[in-house]
Image: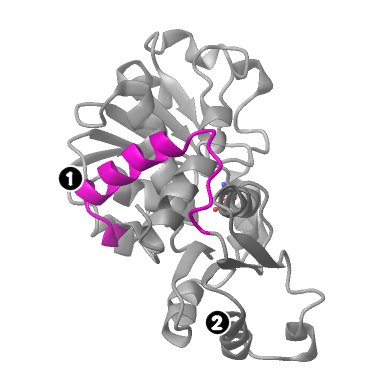
Amino acid sequence: MISIEDVSRKELEDLFLLADEMRGRRTDDLKGKIMASAFFEPSTRTRLSFESAMKRLGGEVIGFSSSEGTSIDKGESFSDTIRMLDRYSDVIVIRHRYEGAARRAAEVAEVPVINAGDGRGNHPTQAMLDLYTIWRKFGCIDGLTIGILGDLRYGRAANSFICGVSKYKVRLKLISPPPLRIRHEVRSKIGIDFEETFDLEKVLPELDVLYVTRIQKERFSDPSEYEKVKESYRITSSTLMKAKKDLVVMHPLPRVGEIDVSVDVTKHALYFDQAANGVPVRMALLKVIFGVV
Ligand code: NCD
């Protein structure tokens, strides 16, 4: 599971229905199976919700949450590390700072590989839980007007969400400071019309969903470029005065100032429920991967 592009609408709908069945459940479906959780980059939600999902399905988890303490520190190659995980587990969940790392792991490993974020590339399971969150909230995704705000240049969650949401008949508004607009290779993959702007005020009243993202400081090769765009947007409860009453604000998290805490107490805030949906969605995905549906 490397990219959301490889997943059809039908597969997504089936996953959502299965995720609904998994909510709050504990089963023995994956008893005897071991998930290797290989996080070479920081994570809170993705790693822990994957581990929680595996345990709730009766499976077990091995792994690491940084390359420190592994033989990578001794100079072991990425491929050799993956070859070992392949022999110790039944599925590998991997996060890495290099774009393409998960695909490379999938070439080396015999067991299934799930991409939990590769550099600025893809984050398919985040897109799955994002789409599931919208589907649960509105009952459908077609027909909605969706704005995606922030770092569309380096944000893998944003990239995968854009690719995922463009499988549906939505009106798409990409809202970012000009230096953080989507890259060419992502642009060419969006199969629907979209508007690009940095005028949030103009598009806000039309939106059903506002998906906010963090500026990916760690991906800028030139710190002065980051300085130019940092703090270029911030949503507060007063920003949302002109929004539709049912607008939902989403964010893959972590947030570092782009959504003020004053939004948390409004009925627009959906980001904590969104993060919670990571567990049933990842349970559903693991069941599909092991063919126990
Ligand atoms: C995102 C990521 O790691 O790409 N976080 C997540 O998985 N929920 C978004 C981010 O770090 O900004």
| Label 1: how many Cα within 10 Å (few below 14, some 14–19, many 20+) | some
11 left or right of 111 in image: left
Q: Is residue 10 magenta?
A: yes
- Per the image, label 2 sits on a secondary structure element best described as helix
Q: Is mark 2 within 8 Å of ligand 1?
A: no
Residue drawn at 58 percent across, 84 percent down: 87
Query: Could one spot residue 179 in this view of the protein?
Result: no
Residue for badge 2: 86
Give the residue displayed 38% in from the left and 12% down from the top.
Answer: 246
- The region drawn magenta spans 5-30
Is 24 in the magenta?
yes
Q: What residue does disc 1 label?
A: 192
Return the x and y of residue 75 as percentages of the image width and height: 74, 91
Q: Is residue 94 above or below residue 173?
A: below
Which quadrant of the view contains residue 218?
A: bottom right
Tell me if residue 106 can be seen: yes
Front-most of residues 121 and 129? 129
Relative vertical location of residue 292 with respect to residue 211 in this rendering, above or below: below
| Residue shown at 62% from the left, 43% from the top | 230
Classify residue 52 as left or right of residue 166. Answer: right
How many marks do you count on the picture? 2
Disc 1 element: loop
Answer above or below: position of 129 versus 87: above
Report the front residue among 136 and 252: 136
Disc on the earlier residue, 1 or 2: 2
